[in-house]
Image: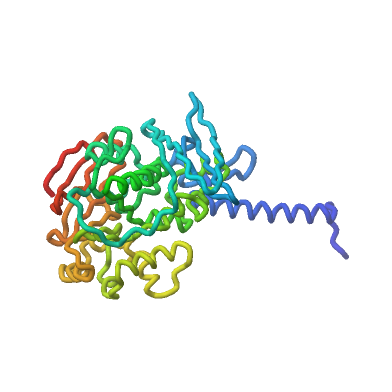
Amino acid sequence: MASTSIFPAWLRKALLVGALLYGFYLAGGVALLAMGRLDRLFFWPGWSVKGPHATRDKSGFEADGPIVFYQHNLLISKSIAPRGQTLTLLTDTFPASALPTLTCFASETGQSFEVPLRVAAAVPADTCALPAQLLAVSDIEGNFKGFTQLLRNTGVVDAQLAWHFGQGHLVLVGDFFDRGLNVTECLWLIYKLEQEAAQAGGAVHFIMGNHERMNLLGQHRYVRRKYRVNADTLGRPYAQWYDRSTVLGRWLRTKNVAEKIGSFLFVHGGISPELAATGISLRRLNDLARASLDTPATHPLSQQVTRPPGSPDWYRGLVQETPTEAQVAQVLATYAATCLVVGHTPVKKVQTLYHGRVIAIDMPHQQRTDAGQPLQTLWLENGQPHVVDSRGHQMPL
């Protein structure tokens, strides 16, 4: 006897399709929760579950931008800016050839600054002479307040955030992305200071860290909720904020992962003995790292340069003192350097390792800023290393 059903065939089919779609919705939602791309998953009206990131990150809609990108024959700038007691979406459109001056507002300090756009940046040199004065800092991670306090009180910028360091050099040893809430503002300040420093005979060196590379490669697990919320308002997904159509994305793609200034070699994570043993030059190292931002690395040497845990932006062995003294000496000899300056691996204080052959500078900047404590980092005066803090005090290293 054929089975019968109280439901007509069309309804059974509709229920089956609905169940399948609901299953896909739940599976996709759970995946997005796990990745931190979703704060809450609703599985029934009024019923939901929070993701693991929802309770930790309370950041939300806030001033941001400008996000500046090319579209067809236009240059478009979008920002979320204060207007009285409210925040307003601002959109400006220019011819693609224009080089307008834009305004960046940092909500963390309430300060605005002007950013003149410039023609596309060139790839920076791998090596340069050591200046009389040099400030090196790493792992700011969107901490605009602490960053600008440090720059002002060490004489790198003035009260209006204009370059005040003359022929000095500012070396930024990676990881200005992620974790903090003023990443965009930090990047525009660096972009601005780079041009002002060059005009004064000084220089800004922006060394790529693993978090810069992660963001350019679409790995956003450390991005704060604020940016996902703001992306909705700006009408541009966060994944497109630093792609090749954007001013900042193009600028970042010119940067090096290692630079030698005098006899000091600056790298975010470090150079492993294994990588140095290949004999790869700084030029080749930087070229391979840049190329991998848009084309996956397939050659074994390219993979060694770009993949954790041994790539220059990820390597932690120097601070963990994994290599021997002889191996570190050989790394330095490969690049005719006397000292490696690294961030990436947190330390309680700026310190030397391997009898001065390595200087580690990744301090807990955000925690110190939140606690009202000064930031500390590396100052070189005529080649002699010192510790300097964001109150302008110098101490022996």
Q: Measured from the top left, where is residue 153 in percent x and y?
A: 23, 37
Left or right: residue 119 compared with residue 282: right
x, y percent for residue 131: 20, 52
Asked if residue 69 is positioned above or below residue 372 in the image, the reply reads below
Where residue 149 sits in the image (x, y, percent)? 28, 37
Q: Nearer the viewer, residue 152 or 163?
A: 163
Seen in the image, is 91 located left or right of residue 270?
A: right
Residue 79 % position (x, y): 50, 38
Report which quarter residue 1 is drawn in.
bottom right
Q: Is residue 209 above or below residue 186?
A: below
Identify which residue is drawn at 55% across, 38% down. 91
Callout count: 0
Name the outermost residue toward the right. 1
> Looking at this view, is 187 or 155 the one in front?
155
Looking at the image, which residue is at 33% across and 60% down?
257
Any part of residue 181 in sight? no
Residue 273 visible at all: yes
**Colour scheme in the image?**
rainbow
**For residue 301, which quarter of the picture?**
bottom left
Q: Which one is nearer the viewer's eye here, 250 or 341?
A: 250
Q: Residue at x 38, y 34 (%)?
A: 108
Q: Give the side of residue 203 with respect to residue 229, left or right.
A: left
Give the camera-side residue of 155 and 301: 155
